[in-house]
Amino acid sequence: MAEYLIVTGLSGAGRSSASATLEDLGWFVIDNLPPALLGKISELTSQSSSELDRFCFVAGRGGAESMSELAPAVAALRSTGARVRVLFLDASDDVLVRRFEGTRRRHPVEGEGVLDAIRSERALLQAIRDDADIVIDTSELNVHELRDRLVEAFSGSEAEGGMQTAVVSFGFKHGIPLDVDLVFDCRFLPNPHWVEPLRELTGLDAEVREYVLSSPEAEGFLGRLDDLLAFLLPAYAREGKSYLSIAIGCTGGRHRSVAIAEELARRIGGHGFTPTVHHRDIGR
């Protein structure tokens, strides 16, 4: 059965980079597709005798009318029973303004200025964002980091891997990730930052890992979180969710959240899922 991936999102958030990466991963990419043609193209691909079975449609580059048609078009495609996922690329307003000012490109949506156009486009795409399977916030990602995220999510097919899971560690002082499903705070755990020999290490080092995980608080937290995920993971999978992202935060994102994220990923593996792990702020 053919698999369809709809790539959309805010202008300047990385659709062109995503398109190139997905093509490298073996997806047949059709760029700048008008939403009105989504159903017709999917009919043609489903009837084709070609060995191609993964199709990526990059949509949402048009004006306001085209953007407003995208969510209904995707809903209609899903109603056929086809395997459909939606990837939405997002970024903060200030980052998008800087990107447009840096390239001197004209924003595709009319507005009194770049910021007004971005906000208008965000409103037009809100419905499809709400319905997206995966949202990636590219505000803090360079092109190489975006490629890594896409490889993690789309190098295999949904049918082969079931629900994909990801665990990300972060520091609250750098902001909560905007593209995750579940967020857990581990700032109540003893902080290695205040232990001089551990301060310059990270949660990937054995000494920090042992310090964090050996505390009674960490043992209780992980045990309860493990029980919760043992219930949630199969429930999400039965509901048809294709991608689940879990964020673990501490103050700076270098010690406690990293150690907990690594251990949590190991436990998720025991529930029959194979998570990817990303430490967003470990280098800060």
Image (cartoon, rainbow, N blue to C red):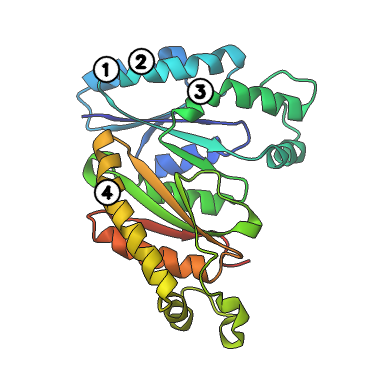
**Closer mark to the observer between disc 3 and disc 1:** 3
x 55%, y 78%: residue: 192
Instruction: Identify which amino acid the numbered label 1 is placed on.
Output: Thr
Classify mark 3: helix, strand or loop. helix
Q: From the image, tell me which residue sits under label 4.
A: 231
How many numbered marks appear?
4
- Can you tell which quarter of the image residue 206 is in? bottom left
Question: Are the residues flagged by discs 2 and 4 in contact, CB closer than 8 Å?
Answer: no
Instruction: Identify which amino acid the numbered label 4 is placed on.
Output: Phe
Q: From the image, tell me which residue sits under label 1.
A: 80
- Mark before the other along the chain sequence, 2 or 4: 2
Alpha-carbon distance for marks 2 and 1? 7 Å
Instruction: Identify which amino acid the numbered label 2 is placed on.
Output: Ala
**Closer mark to the observer between disc 2 and disc 3:** 3
At which x and y percent is residue 262?
40, 66
Residue 127 numbered mark, or none: 3
At which x and y percent is residue 111?
75, 20
Q: Can residue 254 be spotted in the picture?
A: yes
Query: Looking at the picture, does residue 73 appear above or below residue 53?
Result: above
Q: Can residue 31 be spotted in the picture?
A: no
Instruction: Identify which amino acid the numbered label 3 is placed on.
Output: Ala
At which x and y percent is residue 35?
46, 16
Q: From the image, tell me which residue sits under label 2.
A: 76
Q: Is residue 2 left or right of residue 260?
A: left
At which x and y percent is residue 87?
45, 35
Mark 4, Cα crowd under 10 Å, few <14 / some 14-19 / many 20+, is few
Query: Looking at the picture, does residue 132 appear above or below residue 260?
Result: above
x 62%, y 46%: residue: 139
**Closer mark to the observer between disc 2 and disc 4:** 4
x 51%, y 70%: residue: 189
Question: Are the residues flagged by discs 2 and 1 in contact, CB closer than 8 Å?
Answer: yes
- Mark before the other along the chain sequence, 2 or 3: 2
